[in-house]
Image: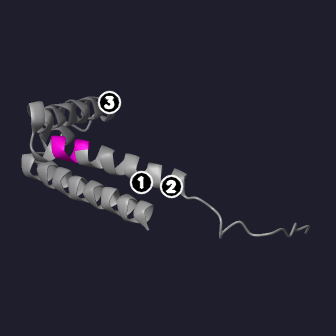
Amino acid sequence: MITIAGPSAAGSSDPIGVLIFLAALGVGGVFIGGRLAFNVRGAVDSTLVRRRAVLEVRAQRTGDLRLSDTGSLGPFFFRFVGSVTMVAGVALLALSLILATA
């Protein structure tokens, strides 16, 4: 095994790429989570319709017609997931801001 030893750049490295990545994930989480949490322009309703259509197609392909009768995930679930995603996005934005100012 060949290893190359060189000076470490850890002391002088600038983590700007990681901060931009965290900020981009945070902004995306806030917008997508907020869209689902507050049902902006019927996001939850369209998600439920899309899920129902996918289940119906899957039931037709597999021949198991019980799949299309499931109603286990309602609007509350998608609003809850949206709110959790939005809070996580705010946390990522705060983390990137804290790391950028430190």
**First in residue order: circle 1 vs circle 3:** 1
Disc 3: CA contacts within 10 A as few (<14), some (14-19) or many (>=20)? few
Figure quadrant of residue 42: top left
Residue 53 x/y as whole percent: 20, 30
Please tell me whether residue 42 belongs to the stretch shown in magenta: no
Q: Is mark 1 on a helix, strand or loop?
A: helix
Kindly identify the residue that appears in the image at 11 percent across and 36 percent down.
40
Q: Residue furthest front?
A: 101
Q: Which residue is denoted by mark 1 in the rendering? A: 22
The magenta stretch is 31-35
Kindly identify the residue that appears in the image at 8 percent across and 51 percent down.
76
User: Residue 8, relative to residue 42: is it above or below?
Assistant: below
Q: Which of the image's four quarters has the C terminus? A: bottom left
Q: Nearer the viewer, residue 26 or 56?
A: 26
Q: Nearer the viewer, residue 58 or 24?
A: 24
Kindly identify the residue that appears in the image at 42 percent across and 54 percent down.
22
Q: Which residue is denoted by mark 2 in the rendering? A: 18
